[in-house]
Amino acid sequence: MDSPHILPVILSGGGGTRLWPLSSPERPKQFLALDGDATLLQQAVARVTGPGFAPPLLVANERHATLIEDQLRAVGCEGARLLLEPEPRNTAAAIALAAVAAPDGATPLLVIPSDHVIRDPAAFRAAVRTALPLAEKGWLCTFGIAPDRPETGYGWIRLGEALGDGARAAAAFVEKPPRDAAERMLTDRAHVWNSGIFLFRAAPLLAALERDAPAVLAAARAAVANAAGTGGRILPERTAFARAPSISFDHAVMEKADRVAVVPVDMGWSDVGSWDALYDIGTPDEDGNVAEGAVLALDTAGCLIRSVAGRRVTVIGLTDLIVVAGERDVLVLPRGQAQQVRAIADRLERS
Amino acid sequence: MDSPHILPVILSGGGGTRLWPLSSPERPKQFLALDGDATLLQQAVARVTGPGFAPPLLVANERHATLIEDQLRAVGCEGARLLLEPEPRNTAAAIALAAVAAPDGATPLLVIPSDHVIRDPAAFRAAVRTALPLAEKGWLCTFGIAPDRPETGYGWIRLGEALGDGARAAAAFVEKPPRDAAERMLTDRAHVWNSGIFLFRAAPLLAALERDAPAVLAAARAAVANAAGTGGRILPERTAFARAPSISFDHAVMEKADRVAVVPVDMGWSDVGSWDALYDIGTPDEDGNVAEGAVLALDTAGCLIRSVAGRRVTVIGLTDLIVVAGERDVLVLPRGQAQQVRAIADRLERS
């Protein structure tokens, strides 16, 4: 990666309900080691560490500040700064904070979620190199994942004209399509999933925010102008930030902006958005089970089984189930139904 | 119940592996409240409390002495004595201890396990009244349960000649029959299950032990003769008791004795010998689930779901499974396979 140095912006605002009961508001999934020894946050940091990258800027809930600092320290990450949101206001406000806090308008910001898995970080970095010239010309770049199922929970992007090697213009955004539309997009080879990873210079992003989401930008500017903070912690001012409309970055900016590029990339990506997704990225044993923790599985096949430290799970004669034993809660359901977990977690956490 | 007063002998030697992970060697199932507020031991005590019954004699593992005293106190049971085995030596030795410790040879001893459920205690007491005249004439009486399945884990008794109203001679004992024999006995209406409940006077029982299990009786006599103890606790002497062969009462005595009577009784009996049995005696909700503890069941039918205090279980879309969340361990398996639990519990407790 050549200069200018890219500023990684790592978004850590996830609420932690879809992998309940392992994740929780106190410890959303980015802080969990789901597929190895490193947490998803630590994997995200590693992915944007090295030549060409400045130390990262993390946008996170202020309640997680110490947790993040501990996890960064454990992997030797130095010089990171934390932009600590007094309350979650969705991704448009989070990215606006980062753009406002960027050192200058020329800096390319590489926005990445903290809670994804990317099996092939070299492919990811190659895609960033592909996007960088476009970003330097003022394009808002996103990264597209080749779909392998008619997923109705994601945003999809229709690919437009070629923009040089490996990049395409974004012809349209399709957020959370109905099933039949997803089926069509899956087969027409003209669509990719929106990975939620972005590369752009701060200046054109601020201009896009100014035009399409001025209330978000104004709130972010006022919150940063009156920020407190010591060391690597920046604390945007609460009252100003609370005025930011809660809206996703895709809705607020990407769907409306003019010069949006997509770099399709095959990098073993997963948003680990459900227990089903965690099974899919796992390495099954010879019986097709993905097990982690103290697990005894007899006559059992095709199951995802997890236990946290101090819990022990014994299963006999099961097929295609998800069994999770957290500190307090136990969850059992068939694979393929994990999208129901979020609503249940919300309900239980409220009760 | 008329005089002479019956001495209830409550056997509390069970090891606590079949309802793992709820039961454990520290707290076998007789000490658990499995089907209501009272523990199985407390239910057993209530069953033999009232006119005609002396305070009970409990034969138990010495490690459970305080637990038993606490549970007796909680239900206002007074005057009970505890015969505390230094180690478990099976039911022949336990019953021999009680017979040796009985106040005199004329006393009818009503031997009952501490870990059964009997839904209709009035029917049970009526059966005891039926057996009492035979016991007073020197018969060894047992109580037979009409079989409803070809159970290969139980002892079966072939019914012989009638011995007055409601009693039959025991023509033969068939311990743990093969499946085809169990199928035949289920349909021939000439067999009952051996409930493990007995009524006899101490004298003929001691004579039967003398003849058929002299080593057991000698060990029990020596252990009681040299017993220590204070208050309601009797501590048979360890070395003497350890010489008792470990043999079941059925094998040692009942299968060989001459004058054995059976009183068939329909009293809602279960030995709660497995999670499947616990489902069978439970009261299912409208979806056929038997749930206890903090349980949330969605789109779920035919399941047994239990959680101990402090654990919460959420299940979605399950059918005919057993889900148990203990303090440390979680167990999930299909209904109908619960007989596998004992071996697994033994294995895990050893590891």
Image (cartoon, coloured by chain):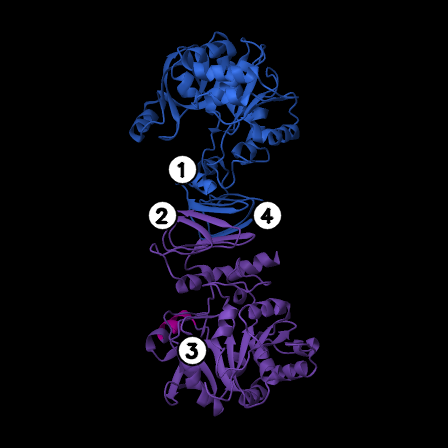
Chain colours: A blue, B purple
Q: Are marks 1 and 3 on the same chain?
A: no
Residue at 32% x, 23% y: name it.
A188
- Answer with the quarter of the image where residue A277 lies: top left
A297 in relation to A211, above or below: below
CB atoms of marks 1 and 2 within 8 Å: no
Q: Which mark is residue B124?
A: 3
Chain-order first, disc 3 or disc 2? 3
User: What amino acid is at disc 1?
Assistant: Gln
Residue indicated by mark 1: A339
Foreground residue, B345 or A56?
A56
Residue indicated by mark 4: A310
Q: Are marks 1 and 2 on the same chain?
A: no
Residue under mark 4: which chain is it in?
A
User: What amino acid is at disc 4?
Assistant: Gly
Residue at 39% x, 25% y: name it.
A155
Magenta stretch: give its range: B178-184
Residue B128 relative to residue A73: left or right:
left
Foreground residue, A217 or A31?
A217
Task: Give the Cα distance between marks 3 and 2.
Answer: 39 Å
Residue B213 picture location, percent across and down: 58, 84
Nearer to us of marks 1 and 3 is 3
Residue indicated by mark 2: B299
